[in-house]
Image (tube, rainbow, N blue to C red):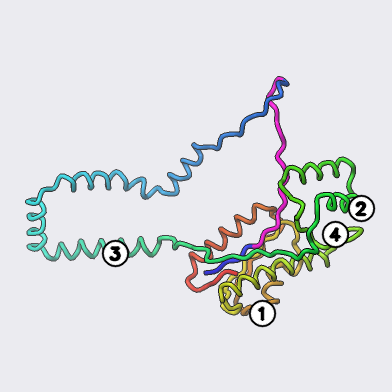
Amino acid sequence: HGATYVYATMSAAAHETTAGGGDGKRQGPRRPGYLKLGYHIVVSNAVYVLLAPFAAALALRASRLTPSDLAAARAYLLANLQLAVSLVSVATALATVYLARRPRAVYLLDFACYKPGPDHVVTRETFMEQSNKAGVFTDDNLAFQRKILERSGLGQGTYFPAAVLNSPPNPCMAEARREAEAVMFGAIDSLLAKTGVRARDIGVVVVNCSLFNPTPSLSAMVVNHYKLRGNVASYNLGGMGCSAGLISIDLAKQLLQISRWVRVG
């Protein structure tokens, strides 16, 4: 199953905190809740935790068996074929139930990222100039943006959409829709070409965008653009911030685990 995920994120530098008393020392990172994590692991694997002592006792008993014990057990089973068949049937049934209920592994076979043309490359100075021309930011806002640019790792060859590069900037709905179409369709076209997957073979579409959430949805734009089949399952995650990236991946994983025929695009 192929899967496409398109992300456009800009991360801000974290605030620096100081210890109490005005000593100027930076507080260390907070330790994760190991107790809570351990509880989650135990609860999620409760069956294995409960069966572990029995498995250990059985392994210990099996390690003490001698060849004569094995020969005696074989003779007993041959003399009681009905019991032997019952034990084999129960073991087969349990193994079948376990394999049927076991979550299937999900693999990402390929991916594609959209890369804009050279017309969208801007420097940090150009971005600050465009922000200043917008006329909606205060001096404090501009200073904060400059701090983000310096600390977030954005280089002098960063891509920005046409709405930001216009003079003055034009962040309207039409420009946002054109930007979304360029990014989504560019990445999906590249992925379909690389994998050889046909658009009509796609059964599920999962689209995530942190901020832009139009109506009709972005997933509807994908379905209409590629003329996907009528029974395609369409999921649009919007307005949830950058964390929805992981949520969309988990959603695609669960859909692939419960369905035996869908492909995720």
Q: Residue at x 69, y 70 (%)?
A: 186
Can you say which quadrant of the picture contains the C terminus?
bottom right
Whole-percent x, y for residue 13 in the image: 72, 42
Q: Which residue is mark 3?
A: 93
Provide the secondary structure element on which disc 3 rests: helix
> What is the C-alpha distance between the residues marked 1 and 3?
44 Å
Provide the secondary structure element on which disc 2 rests: helix
User: At label 4, which amino acid type do we have?
Assistant: Leu
Side of 167 relative to 229 (left or right) = right
User: At label 1, which amino acid type do we have?
Assistant: Lys
Q: Which residue is mark 4?
A: 165
Question: Which label's residue is closer to the chain start, 4 or 3?
Answer: 3
Question: Which label's residue is closer to the chain start, 4 or 2?
Answer: 2
Mark 4, Cα crowd under 10 Å, few <14 / some 14-19 / many 20+, is many
Q: Nearer the viewer, mark 1 or mark 3?
A: 1
| Residue 133: image tag | 2
Q: Nearer the viewer, mark 3 or mark 2?
A: 2
Question: Which label's residue is closer to the chain start, 3 or 2?
Answer: 3
